[in-house]
Amino acid sequence: MTDRGKRILILFAHPSPDRSEVNVPLAETSTEHSAVTFVDLYREYPDLRIDIDREQQQLREHDVIVFMFPLYWYSTPAILKEWQDLVLEYGFAYGAEGRELHGKTFLCAITAGGTENAYHREGFNHFEVRELLVPLENTAGLTGMHYLPPYVLFGARTAVEEGRVSEHIAGWQRLLDALAANTLNLKRAAGSNTLNDELAAIAGSTA
């Protein structure tokens, strides 16, 4: 841990934010955190012409990298795949000389339309969310980052009417505080299915 604390880079991707009931409020809350640099990828790159040099420099300057997005067809919105394909270059993110991301922490903050029960072997979607995100987990491993399980809001379509959004945002704020202060027990968190499972322990945990 450094004296300055951890710097967090959030890469937000929502192709239709005007229809968002959870991701946009979550994003707006994130922008208020002093440790966070927030990038709205669709706003920054409406033509998908991603500035590779700028994005790579942002990665160098931060300790924690977050993909924030709604789960679309069991994966990320398209711009996040484009971002990965262009920014995580050989010689920068991987390969013999590609060590720029080594030691950083990576996680996803996502929303899923289905309920938590739908994301199980016997459920409607047959896989847990963490299993669906294995390509990102492998990407983190290849690039030398420490992978954390996702922070997830299930049943996002009914979250507003069921009054679950404010609690979810409060949990996200606690996670950001813990990541910035380096007080999240990363080893234990890495073994969880979701970071939601860690919320109760955050206040008393140490890294």
Image: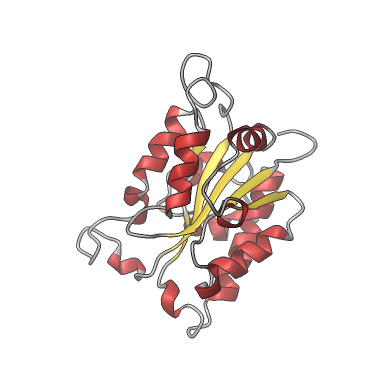
Give the residue at x 56% y 26%: 102
Q: Can residue 9 be seen in this view?
A: yes
Residue found farthest to the right = 3
| Residue 176 in the image: above or below residue 63 | below
Q: If the image is split into quadrants, where does the N terminus sit? A: top right
Q: Where is residue 12 in the image (x, y as percent from the top left)?
A: 56, 55
Number of dots carrying numbers? 0
Residue found farthest to the bottom = 161
Q: Where is residue 58 in the image (x, y as percent from the top left)?
A: 66, 38
Q: If the image is split into quadrants, where does the C terminus sit? A: top right
Give the residue at x 43% y 49%: 192
| Residue 125 in the image: above or below residue 167 | above
Residue found farthest to the top = 96
Q: In which quarter of the image is residue 59?
A: top right
| Residue 96 in the image: above or below residue 116 | above
Q: Where is residue 103 in the image (x, y as percent from the top left)?
A: 58, 29
| Residue 137 in the image: above or below residue 150 | above
Q: Is residue 183 visible?
A: no
Q: Where is residue 114 in the image (x, y as percent from the top left)?
A: 34, 70
Q: How was this image coloured?
A: secondary structure
Q: Is residue 5 left or right of residue 141?
A: right
Which residue occupies the foreground of this view, 67 or 131?
67
Q: In this view, does 121 lie to the left or right of 7?
A: left
Residue found farthest to the left = 122
